[in-house]
Amino acid sequence: MKSLITFFIALAFSINSFADTVSDKEKEALIKLYHATNGPQWKVKWDLSLSVSTWYGVRTENGKVIALDLSDNNLQGELPAEFFDLINLVQVNFQKNKLEGNLPNNIHNLKELEVLNVSDNKFSGTIPAEICDLQKLKDLELFKNKISGELPADLGKLKELEVLALFNNEIQGSLPSSIYKISTLKVLLLNGNKLSGNLSREIVNFRALENLSLFDNSFEGEIPDGLGKLNKLSEMNLSYNKFKGGVSKKIALLDALNMTMFDENGNPFLLEINAERQKNITEN
């Protein structure tokens, strides 16, 4: 009987040990991440002599690393190339650290990724076009960095994207036409950049949109009527741009700053409320 009990204890330990194991490649990628981002200075450190499953912010499942939450943990430096060997990652949250450098092209390795939040860091360079290969991505948050350049042309390939938060960067150029194909978008926050150009009439495709923030850019032209047809839209700010023309009362009331625009001389003015336009939207 004693030997039987000993057998079951050993079996249970063996099963637990197996469940706790990740591949050598993934473990090495985590260790590289630790050293590259000044791990000994993290707020909550990893004891590299213990099992990966005990490491703070690491979630494993069936022997795979599926999530990393190291937000506000004093990570410093650049992400090592080996980080992108963690191909089973579903969620990454590195918000509010001191990470820097570019987001590399090999980000496309993370095919399972649904959430990527590296906001409030020091990332620079452009958003790599390869990020559009992450077909399962639902939440992309890169706000409060130093990201520049234009938005990837194929952004519309992210057909499951619900949150796109890129505010407070240095992104320029116009919105890619493909973005209007993302009908799943609920939150679109692009304020505090250097974006320009017109808004397309295809904005009416954002049927799921709840929060839209484009303020403090250089958008111009008229605001599309279709914006007033987005029934789920409850928060919006388009002010501090160069839009012209009239807007419906419905749209004006949604704007947090009452549609305050800048003219060619940089002087603020309010867009007019177009009663006829409001009537047409109501009737359609």
Image: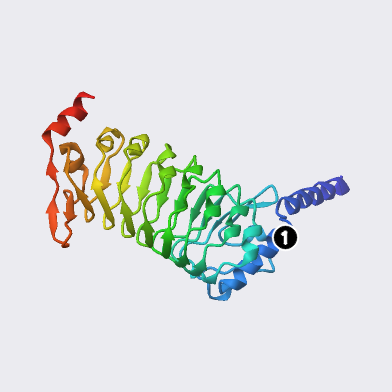
Display coloring: rainbow
Residue 40 percent coordinates (x, y): 57, 75
Asked which secondary structure carries label 1, the reply is: helix
In this view, the residue in front, 163 or 91, is 163
The residue depicted at 60 percent of the width and 69 percent of the height is 34
Residue 90 percent coordinates (x, y): 57, 49
Examine the rendered structure and indicate whether residue 29 appears above or below residue 251: below
**Label 1 sits on residue:** 25
Whether residue 226 sits left or right of residue 124 in the image: it is left
Q: Amino acid at mark 1?
A: Lys
Residue 96 percent coordinates (x, y): 43, 64
The residue depicted at 56 percent of the width and 71 percent of the height is 37
Image quarter where the N terminus lies is top right
Whether residue 166 sits left or right of residue 88 in the image: it is left
Examine the rendered structure and indicate whether residue 213 appears above or below residue 233: below
- Any part of residue 173 in sight: yes
Residue 71 percent coordinates (x, y): 48, 61
